Image: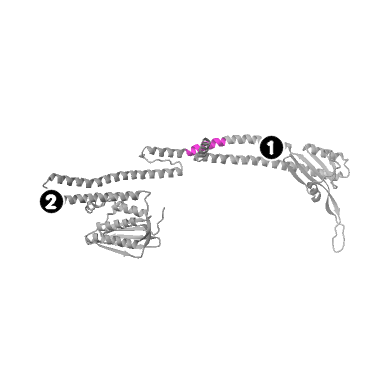
Amino acid sequence: MNIKLKKILSQLKVLRSLKARIFIIVFLIGIIPSIILTYGILENYEDRAVSVRTSDVQNQLNIIANHLITYNYLTDTSSEVISAELEQISNLYDGRIMVINSGLKVIKDTYGTSEGRTVITESVIKCMKEGTGGSNYDAEYGYIEITTPIIETAAADAAVGNGATENKEKKKDVVLGVMLTNVSTESINVTLDILSRRALLLAILMLVAIFAIALLLSHVLMKPFERVAKAISEVKEGYKDEPISVPDYLETEHIVDAFNELQNRMKVVDTSRQEFVANVSHELKTPITSVKVLADSLLAQGDNVPAELYREFMVDIAEEIEREDKIINDLLSMVKMDRTVATMNVTVVDVNALTELILKRLRPIARKRDIEVVFESKRAVTAEADEVKLTLIITNLVENAIKYNREQGWVKVVLDADHQFFTLEIEDSGIGIPEASLEHIYERFYRVDKSHSREIGGTGLGLAITRNAILMHRGSIKASSVEGEGTTFSVKIPLSYVNA
């Protein structure tokens, strides 16, 4: 049972192939019109042949009907001329003719079996009553039934004028009888059989030809996609130096362009990863190297180390250890935010109160450098956010504004909102950022002024972590700066958190 099921699933899998679908579509497009056309031609031939046969017989029967009136055959059937004509028509079309009088009795039957009998059929009665002929084709038994009225034209009187009568000849048709004729369609059927056999042979040849064409087209049309698949599979062994190109179709060109773009991005990511590892190694190694140098210096002094020098070295060692700890904590924070499974503990946050609390904690640091921190709230803001990550965003941006500021400078924090987003602007009077560096400030370990950053304890990870936290809130961050005058960071975050 399992083997059969696997076989069925395998067959269904083949149908999912684009190559198989192209083959099926081309094959059906070719064969269905052929079948319809063949069937239509045969049907049209049969209808046309029956129509022509009926018309020919009807014309000759109309002539005989006139002769029946001329020879008064309905009252005297002894006319050999009429009998010969009836037999001739009957033999010519391999049929049968019955002459029926107004009393619905058969007065002449070319088969000689029904003379004297009464014929009551719908077609005969209708022809007798309306004086019009008709025909009916019976394809099952292979004959055409034709009814022909035997009409005599008589004279009648008509009254004209005001009360005066005048004899005037006026024609009036009188139905005296009906000719009921059955005509064989055997010759039509024989021709139709011959045509059917030829059509079948032609259909088989077309079927084979269409099958071959569909197979060839499906193979040719799929060639570019196979080249794309082959080129992509080669990437498994390593990045190709040159981008792949398959310009046969717009579709393959779009696929290749997207793949080349992805490959370039992967190269950038790989380069970035290597740089990141190198930077992490360098950043972690530097404090350890400093601690080792300081420790070795103390050991080299022996037991006679002055207390002041010992204290100075230990303070330096503690600062390096604290710097190492900050780098590790920042790395851990960034790794947590990089994870796709990073969780968001979303609650309703009073952004005004949270910002005031953060600024209250940071103002003592600002006072040490005589920097004024101002908070301007344009309206009350309540948002759905992760309070911890939002605290991290505001803290990092305000800390940077304080760290990279001038003595007796200022930091201004402006909070505003509309019906969809709330915005935070952190503006400072600091040293500013060169225009060429603005697009790199969110990169990990990137520092505009490495010497100054090291002097104030920067790790180059703060803005990368901040940007990740903002993106997790489906928000955005922009920076504008004038070197030597100050920098402004604009943060925009939705009031309602949408979980993607």
Of helix, strand and loop, which mostly describes the magenta segment? Answer: helix
Choose between 453 and 69: the one closer to the eye: 453
Above-or-below relation of 202 to 299:
above
Number of marks: 2
x and y percentages locating residue 33 in the rendered image: 60, 41
Disc 2 and disc 1 in contact, CB within 8 angstroms: no
* Magenta run includes residue 214: yes
x and y percentages locating residue 373 in the rendered image: 27, 62
Q: Identify the residue shown where x is 43% and y is 45%.
A: 254
What SS does tag 1 mark?
A: helix
**Residue flagged by tag 1: what amino acid is it?**
Leu
| Nearer to us: label 2 or label 1 | 2
In primary-sequence order, the first of circles 2 and 1 is: 1
x and y percentages locating residue 113 in the rendered image: 84, 38
Residue 30 visible? The answer is yes
Above-or-below relation of 204 to 149:
above
Q: Which range is magenta?
A: 209-222
CA neighbours of label 1 inside 10 A, class few (<14), some (14 to 19), many (20+)? some
Q: Which residue is mark 1?
A: 192
Q: Which residue is mark 2?
A: 307
CA neighbours of label 2 inside 10 A, class few (<14), some (14 to 19), many (20+)? few
What SS does tag 2 mark?
A: helix
Q: Identify the residue shown where x is 19% and y is 49%.
A: 317
Left or right, 299 with respect to 85, comes to left
Choose between 19 and 341: the one closer to the eye: 341
Indicate the quadrant where residue 161 lies.
bottom right
Residue 445 visible? The answer is no
Please, which residue is most extreme toward the left here? 304
x and y percentages locating residue 71 in the rendered image: 86, 43
* Magenta run includes residue 81: no
Q: Separation of disc 2 and disc 1 at Cα?
A: 123 Å
